[in-house]
Image: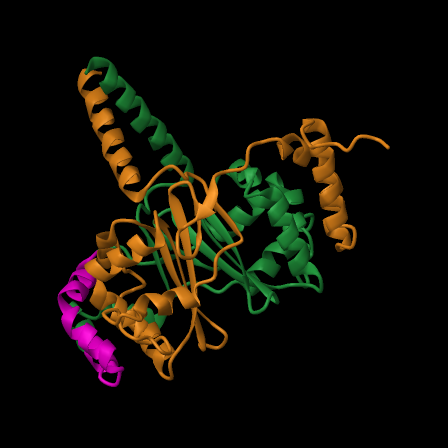
Amino acid sequence: MATLNTGSDPSSDIHAKIRQFRELFADAPEIGKQALENSINTLKSQASDPPPPIGSAGRVGARLGKVSELTIIVPLAPGGAKRLRAFLRILGGNLSQGANLVGTLHTMRFVFFDNDTRLLFATAYDGDWDTYIDDFVAKIPDYLDIIDSAWDGWPGIRSPGAKDYLASHQITAEGWYVAYPDLTVAEILRNQRIAKAVDEFLDKIG
Amino acid sequence: MTTNEAKTNMTAEQKLQKLRELYADAPEIGKAALKNGLAMLTKELAAPGHAQTAGRIGARQGKVSELTVFLPFVPGGAKRLRGFLELLEGNFKAADAVGTVHDMRFVFVDDDTKILFATAYDGDFDPYIEDFAAKIPNAMDLWLCNFEGYPGMRNPKAAADWIAAHQIAAEAWYVNSPNLTAAETRRLEKVGTAVDEFLDKIG
């Protein structure tokens, strides 16, 4: 009997991986099958790359490097969609003053769907889930309650059940990509200040 | 939109009054929060910069736009895409190649009948999709072939129409550094590192 390959040979690992891709796409729509054949060389070339440092954001959510994702889908309370939409429109879709205070928030979006019966709340933020929620609670509790009071069953940010409510409506992303995973919000802001100072410095000596 | 124009033309005090009326019949938590949050809301209303549009669809703040779609799986599509993502192990080199993507997430929802795909990217919707069609058509076909009605990236106009038809514009969109593209953020990272090294040397 032939010796079983232990997987230590990189070229056989790559072949095994390509075989898995092919098996996966065996019954795919034509467009997908064709795309896979066109991609074989690309997939081969990156098959031995070390995978990016994807991990968990703690209690729930995915994290890549320093940046995590939070994706929450909630049912809206009766009248909640109308009130929240009007609230966001009066603010012109601008929540920067409150969101800047949190200090660890890269992006945040509010999306109404299913005929205004549900809301998607999605953010990109720095670090761990628990710390992040604590930051929201400490820095902008009223903001959160103004918005989340439209959510069905929201217990209030000061309630001991608030974190459980949020976690139970969150769905962890199965794919998560960040273009600059090593940069926190604070570091991006710092780099902007540095670049500005460098420009001024160069202007002075130039 | 005329209603939005009317709202921007209101004074801050008129807007606050509208908010109070709006929350008059809100749950107690919301009513109390509005009262306690008035100082913050007053600041918010005075702040410059309002959400703009990313062209055909989607919200934009400064240089950074959002795209949010819910796409229905073909039979077997959820299983295949999940297997595909697992095999990729988070390796999205193709997105690096496009260069205008800040982040993207793939979230399986509603018992694996749909995916939520949400991304932050630079610029306007149509050039963004054209960029994907030009630079990474195969990578796009590999994941999008798992959804109902996808026409293929070799047909970029139809693909853009298909995506737009499934997209829902965000009602609110916040970006911490709206003046930075993904490329600029990466460039600044190098500047920051270089300055740190420089300071280490002279320090």
Left or right of residue B97, residue B154 in this image: right
Name the residue at 32% across, 78% down.
A83
Chain A on-screen colour: orange
Counting the numbered discs, the total is: 0
Q: Nearer the viewer, residue B163 or A117?
A: A117
Region of the chain picked out in magenta, as a range: B18-47
Quarter holding the N terminus of chain A is top right
* Residue B190 place in picture, x, y as percent: 36, 27
- Determine the image quadrant of residue A79: bottom left
Residue A176 appearing in the image: yes
Depth check: give the residue in front, A119 or B86. B86
> Which chain is green in the rendering?
B
Q: Is residue A138 above or below residue B23?
A: above
Image coordinates of residue A195 in percent, x first then y, are 27, 30
Asked whether residue A101 is drawn in magenta, I would say no
- Give the main secondary structure, helix, strand or loop, of the magenta stretch: helix
Relative to A41, B118 lies left or right = left
Residue B179 in percent (x, y) is at 32, 43
In the rendered view, tell whether residue A63 sits above or below residue A118: above
Query: x, y (%) of residue A52?
Result: 50, 38
